[in-house]
Amino acid sequence: MKNEFKTKKQLISESTELCKMLSDLERVDGILDNKGIDLPVLQNILNQTNDAIYLINPVTSKFIDVNEKACVDLGYSREELLKLGVIDIEAVLPNNFLWKEHVKEIRNQDGAIIEGKHKRKDGTVFPVEISVRYIHQENSQYMVAVVRDITERKLAEERLRQSEVRFKNLVEMSSDWVWMVGEDGVYTYVSPKVESLLGYTVEEVLGKRPFDFMPADEAERVSTIFGVIFERRESFACMENTNLHKDGRPVVLETSGVPIFDNDGAFRGYRGIDRDITDRIASEIARKQGDSDLKRKGEELEKLSDELHGLTIEMADIEERERKAFAEMLHDVVGQNLASLNLTWGAIYKDISSLNEGQKAQFDQVNFLIKDTIKFTRSLTQELYQQIPDGLTLQDAVITYGNTCLKKFGIKLSFELEDGINYIPKEIKQFLIRFIRESFQNIMKHASAKRVEVFCSVDGGVINAKVVDDGTGFSPKDVDLTKKKSGIGLMLMRERVRNLSGQLHIDSTPGEGTTLSCTLPL
């Protein structure tokens, strides 16, 4: 495993162990430098180490001596191992391996550190790291090897390698751009995604700073914000910033990052991701523009609605005036002329006794037509425009219009009016009178009702009025009070209610009658 993948603690531990091994070897050198080998002392030293130690004959490659750790690692007894040599336990040797050449290389280099694989007695193999030295003792030569089982280290390296592969695959498959910057803010790593985002290759971005890819004013803005974050070593998320693609077009990125610290707690830079949100920003701008346009159109529509409301009220007033004018014309012109005709006709024939039977019949017919036309004209005049006297109470109006519109059709009328209803403002009272009158006229024309009930009350500053009939009824969904097809009367009634800040409701079921109600604030 390369040193950059080891933690500081691992490096310190390995350095300590290496120093201990060298110290052991130096003690072996000291013993061998004596006139004779003190085997008991040497054996004691060898058995105290944490690594396997082999004393090797450089000519035959056979083991002269081994410590207990070597026996444990390989699964042999000491006596069994002393019958073997390096070539017997080394699982992997090059095809062109020559022991003499190997010894010569070790002797010339004054030692070496080698990685290999040792084979246990049971045939299993495990990785090892071998530190070997060549030692001269008067006319004798020896090789001393300190062997460490590095199985765990190799497993850790493999896990790290697999983790790096998974990380690389994940990064390269991600739709986001992954990056790292050092303490100086310069990119030390960028994922290939940068090319699809900004059009630059990984090599073109490495060694640059994030602000190098921004317009000048944006670089100044972002560097000011990021400078504070950088100094405080804080994490940050969803920082929007505009960059320039290699082709010159703007690209809006959303940047998030976290600070990097080593095992000593020293700051080493930032790692993070960038996400392209150009389309999202464009959609938000379009939506805001759409909302603005919708609001403007809504305001225009509200203005038009207010104008329509005003025109509707004005139309209602015009209708009232036209009804009054036409009624006055009928009364003043047609009615007066009919009255004069009646008087003149009667004066002409003061004595009908001189007429024969045929003439008498004709006289009676003309006289009947004149009187019937006068009666119809008066009735039409009253129906077209019925003046609402200032002193007329709501009860008087109900009775008057009931007799005018309902009684002649055999419709029974009942009503319930609270006393407080007589003290409401004149404008509201006149509306209620019109509301009742037009309701009666609609019932008379369309409902085929036998009974009508009127209710008016004042409750908590709100006036409630309703007219109920037991006529044919209809489906309310077929009546749109906002459209003319529902009837000019209902539409005008609705607008008058709205003008008084009230509400108009229709509740009806085919065959079960109709309830027309309104609520008005005082």
Image (cartoon, rainbow, N blue to C red):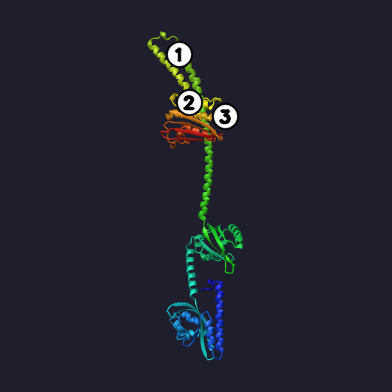
> Where is residue 267, by image quadrant?
bottom right
What amino acid type should be assigned to the residue bearing mark 2?
Gly
Q: How many marks?
A: 3
Q: What is the number of the mark on residue 402?
A: 2
Residue name at image x 59 percent, y 61 percent? 234
As helix, strand or loop, the secondary structure at mark 2 comes to: helix
Residue toward you, 45 or 12: 45
Question: Looking at the image, is mark 3 or mark 2 earlier in the sequence?
Answer: 2
Residue name at image x 50 percent, y 22 percent? 329
Residue toward you, 345 or 387: 387
Dot 3, how many residues are within 10 Å of its Cα: few (below 14), some (14-19), or many (20+)?
Answer: few
| 262 vs 519: above or below | below
As helix, strand or loop, the secondary structure at mark 1 comes to: helix
- Location of the C terminus by quadrant is top right
Q: CA separation, marks 2 and 1?
A: 35 Å
The residue that label 1 is drawn on is: 345
As helix, strand or loop, the secondary structure at mark 3 comes to: helix
Residue toward you, 460 or 195: 460
| 162 vs 98: above or below | above
Residue name at image x 57 percent, y 87 percent? 30
**Position of residue 385 measured from the top left corner of the image (x, y, whole percent):** 50, 25
What amino acid type should be assigned to the residue bearing mark 1?
Trp
Q: What is the number of the mark on residue 423?
A: 3
Dot 2, how many residues are within 10 Å of its Cα: few (below 14), some (14-19), or many (20+)?
Answer: many
**Position of residue 170 measured from the top left corner of the image (x, y, whole percent):** 48, 64
Q: Residue furthest top?
A: 354
Q: Residue furthest left?
A: 358
